[in-house]
Amino acid sequence: MDVYPGLIVKSTAGREKDKFFVVLDIVDDIYCLIADGRTRKVDMPKKKKIKHLIATDVCSEGIKDKLKTAQTVTNSMVRKELKSFEDFEM
């Protein structure tokens, strides 16, 4: 699975199963850092195995551009991007 910063993903395992997150960074081939802006804040993201995520076909271009240019991504930006996925079932 191709995971990159700014991609919106759904968790398939763990306490946060069936919740949506935004990928903030790729740690290595196995792990990435994710946040939802509520329980997992941008300043303390969750380190999650990539194999426990399902990628959606949606990428937040605003967050992706800010991460590329090392600008600050806020929790409210992440929440705003994930708002449309709250009642969405994959």
Image (cartoon, helix red, strand yellow):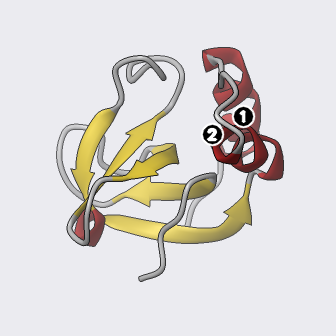
Q: Can you tell which quarter of the image residue 83 is in?
A: top right
In terms of depth relative to the viewer, which is nearer, 61 or 89? 61
Q: Which residue is depicted at the point 72% across and 64% down? A: 58
Q: Residues within 10 Å of mark 2 (few under 14, many from 20)?
A: few
Q: Which residue is mark 1?
A: 83
Q: Can you tell which quarter of the image residue 26 is in?
A: bottom left
Q: Which residue is depicted at the point 50% across and 31% down? A: 36
Task: Decide if residue 53 is on the left or right side of residue 57.
Answer: left
Residue 85 in the image: above or below residue 70 = below
Secondary element at image label 1: helix
Q: Which residue is depicted at the point 29% across and 35% down? A: 46
Task: Decide if residue 55 is on the left or right side of residue 40.
Answer: right
Amino acid residing under circle 1: Lys
Q: Which residue is depicted at the point 60% across and 68% down? A: 56
Q: Residues within 10 Å of mark 1 (few under 14, many from 20)?
A: few
Residue 13 in the image: above or below residue 30 = above
Residue 22 in the image: above or below residue 78 = below
Residue 20 in the image: above or below residue 11 = above
Residue closest to the far bottom: 1
Expressed as whole percent of the image width and height from the top left, the position of residue 12 reads 30, 60
Q: CA distance from mark 2 to mark 1?
A: 6 Å
Expressed as whole percent of the image width and height from the top left, the position of residue 45 reads 36, 29
**Which mark is drawn over residue 86?**
2
Amino acid residing under circle 2: Glu
* Quarter of the figure that contains the N terminus: bottom left
Expressed as whole percent of the image width and height from the top left, the position of residue 52 reads 25, 64
CB atoms of marks 2 and 1 within 8 Å:
yes
Task: Decide if residue 34 is on the left or right side of residue 59.
Answer: left
Secondary element at image label 2: loop
Q: Can you tell which quarter of the image residue 43 is in?
A: top left
